[in-house]
């Protein structure tokens, strides 16, 4: 989706009279303002020239176009310079490309996404390579297709499939696109442009149909049927994304074109696009888009010119849920893996977990039987360290026990090659503690995966002050190959994600002990956009893990830890969360949660032991206050993480919150969301609660300083200095 470089198109006319217009704007030939203007000029020129009979549009270096350049969504200046979507959609796409009196064919390879596909759909035919990716992913950015996509796609593939492509933002490959009618032919890359040339001349000579996709009607259902399909799509959109408006706007715009005609639909689309670009949802999702791409740039590490070393073999210690999940992620990307366990029973269980993870992909149609068999041959089991003598990286994934991890790392140093990376999947324990008994501090690193490791998209890469930049570069490369988003953070208890979110459950427990209903808290937080509330999450994780990690925070941050007795009391009665079918909720055979009327007895007991009484103000707490009392302590801790340099930039914490904890991306991440409310407001609320309920809510110095000056929490130190 684009760079800010000066893009252009290049036109070359062959002896056959076909003008080849090539979009050039590396790396993905995005449609910047310059490219769009140049595309119009090239078309105008081709139409004026007598030696041009037909036109082929293609993209340089095997990529048609990755879409409209979203960097132009930025500030007020960019918005002023950006041509209005109505002008692009009608004057360039419809009245110049589609209405041209000479036939045009799109030759699609690589990517035809967003605006790229919209340009292609305006041509009279499309030829694609089998693996080209075609799609309209705009809804991922809080907007809708703005160059006619809402009008042309339904007319080419039918209403149901068009809605699916737009609402899921999932591209289709060239082969599938041919079956749908989105492309007219599929050929190999070396035949692509020549086939498109001949096709364009065949249209000119009427050997093939001259099609205007905007006015096609054969794929559109009768009005009554179309309205039923749209009604169902609306119901699904409300159910799946209750906090989002733009999917409903997209459906409205599609309907406008069907009811009032495509030209009216184009203007409605342009108007809606312009409104949505200014929305908070769009700003949040565009922020996440760029933040995700920025995580792999680490000052002082990735700017040194270091090349990543090839990891030929990786060893994993521990075949439990995490170890087997990490092994699955690695073999899916063709890394040979050695899985070590303490005995044959545990080893067999670990390998069976890997097989089960892979088999679930077969069931979902994401993997063939042949690929499964190839992947499983990459896993070798081991009960000792002998096979570790030629591994390039070891990832330790055993239980959170400091002395056990220290022993393991001391053993690894003896058996592994001197350049082998020694990584730990610990979620909370300080890496300096883990590596205390080794002399290999420069190659010790945290590789913190999130559960389930082969599914969750985040990899928290934890560096100590001694970790070598080369080791960080190597792990960044592995994360890219196993399709994880990496976030490089500093070393401390809990690192970035768990450190930020340790107050999340504690705030909920504080509210519960003072009278707020458990199920109301979870309901409100889920409605806000989290996958589940803090107390349902505690059940899922299990109270054993909650207590083990919580004790790390109590030990390291005693002054701001809320010490609730509720979980220990529940544990005493053999309630440990979902695994025991009883925690804050009751669970049936299918692990479906339902409220437990007996929970109030445990809460009353916890109050008596803690000496806490019910606060009438917290019994009927408004939704807004529940959200703020749960999340503002998280924001406060995130500020400390920034202040201590554990995170390099606020955007990394936004990505960590979204991909590690399920914070809603359409709110832009934890710091971005906090800045939308303002540092002064957050500070004043926390200050008031700290007076009422103690140190747990006390605003940190970083937050206080920024609130005093009205400076955003996300502003870098350099930006703050320039503001002051």
Image (cartoon, rainbow, N blue to C red):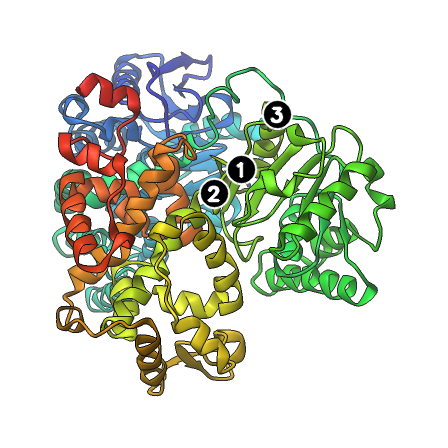
Choose between 513 and 483: the one closer to the eye: 513
Circle 1 SS class: strand
Contact check, label 2 and label 1, Cβ < 8 Å:
yes
The x and y percentages for residue 547 are 49, 63
Residue that label 2 marks:
495
- Residue at image location 58% in from the left, 60% down from the top: 365
Question: Can residue 719 be seen in the rendering of this structure?
Answer: yes
The x and y percentages for residue 299 are 46, 21
Q: What mark, if any, has residue 675 been given in the picture?
A: none
Q: What mark, if any, has residue 462 been given in the picture?
A: 1
Residue that label 3 marks:
468
The x and y percentages for residue 144 are 25, 45
In primary-sequence order, the first of circles 2 and 1 is 1
Q: Residue furthest right?
A: 386
Q: CA distance from mark 2 to mark 3?
A: 18 Å
Relative to 25, does residue 358 appear above or below in the rendering? below
Relative to 461, does residue 247 appear above or below in the rendering? below
């Amino acid at each position: 989706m684009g760079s800010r470089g000066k893009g252009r198109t290049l036109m070359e006319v062959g002896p056959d009279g076909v003008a080849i217009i090539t979009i050039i704007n590396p790396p993905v030939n995005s449609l910047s303002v310059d490219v769009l203007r140049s595309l119009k000029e090239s078309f105008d020129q081709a139409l004026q020239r007598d030696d041009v009979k037909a036109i082929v549009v293609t993209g340089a270096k095997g990529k048609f176009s990755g879409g409209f350049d979203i960097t132009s969504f930025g500030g007020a200046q960019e918005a002023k310079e950006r041509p209005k979507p109505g002008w692009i959609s009608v004057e360039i796409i419809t009245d110049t490309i589609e209405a041209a009196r000479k036939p045009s064919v799109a030759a699609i390879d690589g990517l035809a996404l967003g605006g790229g596909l919209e340009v292609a759909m305006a041509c009279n035919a499309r030829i694609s390579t089998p693996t080209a990716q075609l799609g309209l992913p705009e809804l991922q950015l809080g907007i809708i297709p703005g160059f006619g996509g809402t009008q042309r796609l339904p007319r080419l593939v039918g209403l149901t499939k068009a809605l699916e492509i737009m609402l899921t933002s999932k591209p289709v490959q060239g082969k599938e696109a041919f079956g749908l009618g989105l492309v007219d032919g599929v050929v190999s890359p070396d035949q692509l442009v020549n086939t498109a040339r001949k096709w364009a001349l065949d249209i000119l000579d009427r050997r093939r149909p001259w099609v205007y996709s905007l006015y096609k009607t054969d794929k559109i259902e009768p009005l009554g049927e179309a309205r039923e399909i749209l009604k169902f799509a609306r119901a699904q959109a409300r159910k799946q994304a209750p906090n989002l408006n733009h999917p409903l706007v997209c459906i409205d715009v599609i309907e406008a074109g069907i009811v009032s005609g495509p030209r009216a639909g184009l203007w409605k689309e342009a108007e809606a696009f312009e409104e949505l670009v200014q929305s908070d949802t769009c700003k949040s999702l565009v922020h996440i888009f760029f933040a995700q791409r920025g995580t792999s740039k680490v000052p002082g590490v990735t700017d040194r010119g270091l090349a990543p070393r090839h990891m030929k073999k990786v060893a994993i210690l521990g075949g439990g849920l995490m170890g087997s999940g990490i092994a699955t992620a690695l073999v899916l990307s063709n890394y040979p893996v050695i899985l070590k366990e303490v005995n044959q029973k545990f080893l067999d269980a670990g390998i069976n977990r890997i097989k089960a993870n892979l088999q679930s992909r077969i069931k979902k149609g994401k993997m063939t039987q042949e690929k499964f068999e190839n992947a499983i041959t990459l896993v070798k089991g081991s009960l000792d360290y002998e096979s570790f003598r030629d591994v390039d990286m070891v990832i330790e994934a055993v239980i959170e026990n400091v002395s056990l991890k220290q022993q393991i790392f001391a053993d690894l140093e003896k058996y592994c090659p001197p350049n082998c990376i020694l990584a730990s999947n610990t979620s909370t324990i300080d890496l300096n503690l883990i590596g205390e008994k080794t002399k290999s501090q420069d190659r010790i690193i945290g590789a913190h995966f999130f559960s389930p490791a082969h599914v969750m998209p985040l990899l928290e890469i934890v560096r100590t002050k001694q970790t070598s930049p080369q080791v960080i570069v190597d792990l960044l490369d592995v994360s890219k190959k196993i399709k994880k988003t990496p976030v490089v953070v500093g070393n401390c208890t809990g690192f970035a994600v768990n450190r930020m979110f340790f107050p999340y459950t504690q705030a909920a427990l504080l509210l519960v002990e003072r009278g707020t209903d458990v199920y109301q808290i979870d309901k409100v937080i889920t409605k806000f956009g989290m996958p589940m509330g803090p107390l349902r999450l505690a059940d899922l994780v299990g109270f054993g893990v909650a207590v083990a990690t919580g004790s790390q925070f109590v030990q390291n941050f005693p002054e701001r830890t809320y010490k609730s007795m509720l979980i220990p009391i529940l544990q005493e009665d053999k309630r440990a969360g979902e695994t025991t079918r009883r925690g804050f909720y009751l669970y049936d055979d299918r692990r479906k949660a339902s409220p437990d009327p007996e929970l109030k007895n445990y809460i009353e007991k916890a109050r008596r032991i803690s000496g806490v009484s019910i606060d009438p103000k917290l019994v009927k707490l408004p939704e807004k206050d529940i959200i703020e009392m749960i999340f503002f302590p998280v924001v406060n801790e995130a500020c400390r993480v920034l202040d201590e340099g554990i995170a390099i930039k606020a955007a990394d914490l936004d990505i960590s919150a979204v991909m590690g904890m399920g914070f809603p991306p359409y709110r832009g991440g934890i710091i971005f969301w906090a800045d939308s409310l303002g540092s002064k407001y957050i500070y004043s609320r926390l200050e008031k609660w700290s007076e009422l309920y103690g140190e747990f809510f006390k605003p940190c110095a970083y937050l206080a300083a920024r609130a005093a000056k009205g400076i955003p929490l996300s502003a870098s130190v350099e930006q703050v200095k320039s503001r002051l």
